[in-house]
Amino acid sequence: MHMDPILPPLVAMILIILMLSLLLRSIGQPNVVAYLIAGVVLGPQGLGLITDHITLERLGAFGVVMLLFFIGLKMHPRKLAANWRVALIGTLLQIAASLALAWAIGWFLDWPLARRVLIGFVISLSSTALVLNFLQSRGELASRAGQNALVVLLMQDLAVIPMLLLIGMYGDEQAGSAELLRQTTGAVIIAGLCMWMFLQEHIHLPWVHRIVGQDRDLQVFVALIICFGLALMTGLLSLSSALGAFVAGMMLASA
């Protein structure tokens, strides 16, 4: 009998995550810590149970896309738009502070300007998936602090575009102009979708209702098409696929 080789490591991964989550929950730690420990234990540098890097990347990317999609289902564009000042000012202050720190370290270590800028931009970015998972596990995602953190994280994802542009200028590289054009196009599309959702109290998709009706199975497939379709679009435009999935979740939450 043929067995898919991915099944044994997948079962082991889920079992270890479950046990670690139960153990860490007893001492008040979020589930995301269990995910990180399980990755270290099972990965190539640990027990080596999972060594297929392609499989790891695919599983990780799929998990992040679904996580951001489900979080988006709990959000409404108007709720997020109310915090635009926090998003803009918070992101700018964080980037400025990171650049100042990298500049100070680079001054002592005699780094070139391009390296200082690159390091500053790198340390100014956060992992959207990890932070949102942490907030969700603690029940703080709907709080004021959680909403502020969410809008800053989303603004960081969009801030990557001007960051890459500046890095290319300091590094005297023009090869990434096509990628920057794609990212800019993607950012405009995402911003346009968010603005459209903000202007609509409820999004009406009559053609979907006519085709799907009350069929629950078809409704699930339509939701998956919207989720992975937007994730695919943002991925093709050199943006985060998780960002597209998050916007898809907000779109369905507004429907």
Image (cartoon, rainbow, N blue to C red):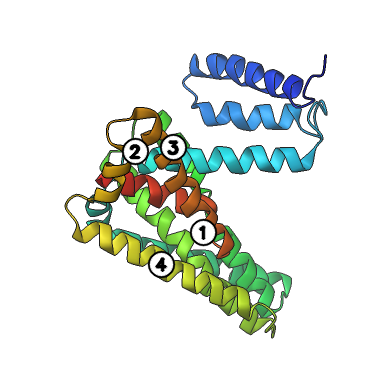
- State which tag comes first along the sequence, 2 or 3: 2
Q: CA distance from mark 4 to mark 1?
A: 10 Å
Label for residue 233?
1
- State which tag comes first along the sequence, 4 or 3: 4
Q: Quadrant of residue 218?
A: top left
Image vertical order of residue 161 relative to residue 203, above or below: below
- State which tag comes first along the sequence, 1 or 2: 2
- State which tag comes first along the sequence, 4 or 1: 4
- State which tag comes first along the sequence, 1 or 3: 3
Q: Which residue is mark 2?
A: 141
Q: Amino acid at mark 1?
A: Met
Q: Which residue is mark 3?
A: 221
Nearer the camera: disc 2 or disc 3: 3
Residue 227 at x, y percent in the picture: 45, 46
Q: Which residue is mark 4?
A: 189
Which residue is drawn at the image coordinates 49% and 48% (left, top)? 128
Image vertical order of residue 129 relative to residue 192, above or below: above
